[in-house]
Amino acid sequence: MPDPQRILVVAPNWLGDAVMALPAIADIRRAFRTARVIVGARRSVAGLFTLAPPVDGVVTLGWDGRWWARGSFAGDVVLLRELGADVAILLPNSFAAAWLVRRADIPDRWGYAADWRRPLLTRAVARPRGGRHQGAYYQYLTRALGVESGPLEPVVAVPERAMAAACALLRDRGWDGASPLVVCAPGAAYGTAKQWIPSSVVQLVTDLVRMRQATCVFVGTAADAPTARSIASGLDREVAAHLIDVTGDTTLEGLAAVLALARACVSNDSGAMHMAAAVGTPLVALFGPTRERETAPLTRAGGHADVLTHPVWCRPCMLRTCPIDHRCMTGITPQRVLACVDRLMASQPRARP
């Protein structure tokens, strides 16, 4: 077939997965230099792709894959038909993604042969055997489609206007503009088993404020706000005065800008963790029940991430809640995390407004 002129890339549905898909999307951009690369993404992650340099446009999809949501499905079909794409490359494995682009009459539909959807695809790639990093999993697909793989490096570009807005937000909430910012992402969508122990977060924030004269910033989605408030309630008044909680208060662009202002980030295995790595913020990533080999943060060139685990017999269990004593997370001490933050801040100083 001739080179496509308009390529639709259907994005993963979770923020972390969407960030890990950026290297494969960059590969598609390099392989089809004359084509427009447009990403179709659910509203919860669409904002990420407006910050991705390889992407020419973003289509926000409303259908969540539920078969009874016929109105949003029909609306997405109309949007994708009007797009006039020659090819759809499906990064999710779901039948729903393939059904959507088939009903939108996109002539070429490429993706993994998964979830009984092979008849809906014009090029179906067998999934690789064995475990691999999720970013490499997406690149395996695009490589099988004839796209050469480049660096396994996600890049998020934060506009200056977003940086200025984030700086103004933090100043309005008490940042003096001079103390080092350390971002903490205490939540995790997958479940409480992925969350570092609240008392450990309290101790880390206390040490950062009292010993390092830092301002700490809590980030996350609206669903993370109760976790953040609960942890904040455990701080004494003097320390709490140097905590800024913006969980649920930022767009993805705003989150990226806050991370870009930070000297370091401490995060559970979450979407915020992957965003920090793609922005280039020095990162301490805390892994408990999940497999760091498959979802460790991919850092952009010049960035650095320390991945911390505590070796116990029961990890990685991949459970949402711990049925015993959460030893994989209790074993990661605040002192160990603080030492990593200190090292990252000392070795990678970054100019701030």
Image (cartoon, rainbow, N blue to C red):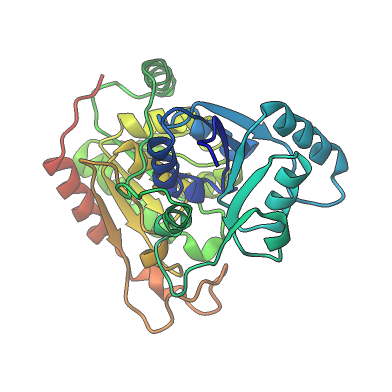
Task: Tell me if residue 112 comes above or below residue 131 in the rendering.
Answer: above
- Disc tally is 0
Q: List x then y, in percent, for residue 340.
A: 21, 53
Residue at point 24%, 59% (across, down): 335
Left or right of 62? Residue 297 is: left
Q: What x and y, as percent, mark residue 310?
A: 32, 72
Front in this rendered view, residue 36 or 336: 36
- Asked if residue 279 can be seen in this view, the reply is yes
Residue depicted at x 44% and y 21%? 169
Q: Name the image quarter holding the C terminus.
A: top left
Residue 156 appears in which quarter of the rendering? top left
The quarter of the picture where the N terminus appears is top right
Image check: 332 left or right of 51?
A: left
Q: Residue furthest bottom?
A: 313
Q: What percent of the width, then of the height, locates residue 316?
A: 44, 75
Q: Which of 151 and 289 is in front in this view?
A: 151
Instruction: For residue 236, say whether it is visible.
Output: no
Residue under the image location 29 percent in, 42 percent down: 300
Q: Which residue lies furthest to the left in this view?
A: 347
Q: Where is residue 44 in the image (x, y as percent from the top left)?
A: 61, 39
* Outermost residue toward the front in this view: 1
Task: Using the rendered view, name the quadrant where residue 100 is placed.
Answer: top right
Residue at horizontal 61 percent and vertical 46 percent from the top: 223
